[in-house]
Amino acid sequence: MDFIEVSAKSVDDAITEACQQLSITSERLDYEVVDEGSSGFLGLGTKQAVIKARIKNSISDRAGEFLADVFKAMAMEVNVEVSY
């Protein structure tokens, strides 16, 4: 999955916003801070915090994607269902 870019008043607020946009909890969020932002001086020159975020893949997700790619390369139509 590609990253989404989220900006907010603080990094914590950006993380919360990313979780809401992706409909996940913070434990499943993979993110990197692009800009921590700043509060400026007396409210002037404020910059919002910016993060790039995506859903963290679990081991079972990665295994399912790998198997699907292998079968696709072999030109086989296979339904891959992973239970952990």
Image: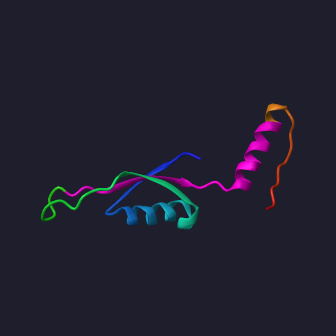
Q: Magenta segment, which residues?
A: 46-71
In the displayed structure, does residue 18 sit left or right of residue 50? right
Residue pushed farthest front? Answer: 59
Q: Residue at x 45, y 66 (%)?
A: 16
Q: Position of residue 35 (x, y in %)?
A: 33, 51
In the displayed structure, does residue 17 sit left or right of residue 82? left
Q: Position of residue 50 (x, y in %)?
A: 36, 53
Q: Residue at x 40, y 61 (%)?
A: 14
Q: Residue at x 48, y 50 (%)?
A: 4
The answer to which quarter of the image holds residue 78 is top right
Q: How is the image coloured?
A: rainbow
Residue pushed farthest left? Answer: 42
Assess whether residue 45 is covered by the magenta stretch.
no
Q: Position of residue 19 (x, y in %)?
A: 51, 63
Q: Quadrant of the C terminus?
A: bottom right
The reply to whether residue 24 is visible in this rendering is no
Q: Residue at x 18, y 59 (%)?
A: 40
The reply to whether residue 77 is visible in this rendering is yes
Labels in figure, total: 0
Q: In front: 5, or 62?
A: 62
Q: Is residue 40 above or below residue 2?
A: below
Q: Position of residue 77 (x, y in %)?
A: 86, 40
